[in-house]
Structure formats: structure tokens, C-alpha cells
């Protein structure tokens, strides 16, 4: 079972509101962490709530930027610019990959 998880594609959704400094930083941090820890096994979808505000309701987004891990389940959320790598990796539960 653990081997299946290692090959699973992680689906991550980042909610932002335009190109604010926090949103740009969050995306840059997320891409860097994914390349370091999930290389070749992740998909990032960026949703700009200025363009599609109705999409916030589906994932119950209350603050931005917010990162939502859709797959693997369970769904997890992290709010902020994702600058604390340790907190982000723990929040996403990426640390189990490095054991």
C-alpha cells in the first residue's frame, strides 16, 4: 500500500486573489517544495478568485492565499504565503515520503 502512495500524483490547488506579493510568494514556495519533495508526482492548479470568485465556495476558502491538498486524501488546507517550509510539509503530510 505504501508503494502505491509513493507513485500517487498529488493534486494541489492554490487559491489566490490576483498577483499580490503574498500570492506570488506562495506559488513560488509551493513550486520549490514540490520540485524538492514530490518531483514528477504533483499537479498544481492555481485559482484566481478575482477571476472565478464562485470557486471559493467548493473548498470553503475563507482567506487567501490558501493551499488545498485534494489528493492524496484526506483533504488538507494551509493558509498563508507558504514561507515556513517545515510547517507546509507537515501540513501537507509530505514528511512521510522521506522516512
Image (tube, rainbow, N blue to C red):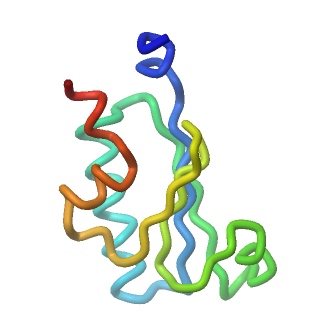
Total numbered badges shown on the rendered structure: 0
Picture coordinates of residue 28 (x, y %)?
Answer: 32, 64
Q: Quadrant of residue 83?
A: bottom left
Report the residue at 53% width, 51% height from top.
69
Q: Is residue 94 above or below residue 19?
A: above
Which quarter of the rendering shows the C terminus?
top left
Q: Quadrant of residue 53?
A: bottom right
Report the residue at 28% width, 50% height from top.
89
Q: Quadrant of residue 25?
A: bottom left
Report the residue at 52% width, 24% height from top.
8
In front: 52, or 5?
Answer: 5
Picture coordinates of residue 70 (x, y %)?
Answer: 60, 48
Report the residue at 57% width, 64% height from top.
46
In front: 26, or 99?
Answer: 99
Picture coordinates of residue 35 (x, y %)?
Answer: 30, 41
In front: 6, or 33?
Answer: 6
Q: Is residue 18 above or below residue 68?
A: below
Residue found farthest to the right: 54
Q: Is residue 23 above or below residue 43?
A: below
Q: Is residue 77 left or right of residue 47?
A: left
Q: Is residue 19 left or right of residue 60?
A: left
Amino acid at each position: 500500500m505504501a508503494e502505491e502512495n509513493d507513485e500517487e500524483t498529488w493534486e494541489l490547488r492554490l487559491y489566490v486573489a490576483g498577483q499580490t506579493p503574498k500570492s506570488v510568494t506562495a506559488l513560488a514556495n509551493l513550486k520549490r517544495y514540490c520540485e524538492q519533495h514530490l518531483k514528477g508526482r504533483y499537479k498544481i492548479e492555481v485559482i484566481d478568485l478575482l477571476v472565478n470568485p464562485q470557486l471559493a465556495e467548493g473548498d470553503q476558502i475563507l482567506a487567501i492565499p490558501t493551499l488545498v491538498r485534494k489528493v492524496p486524501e484526506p483533504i488538507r488546507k494551509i493558509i498563508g504565503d507558504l514561507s515556513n517550509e517545515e510547517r507546509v510539509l507537515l501540513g501537507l503530510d509530505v514528511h512521510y515520503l522521506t522516512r
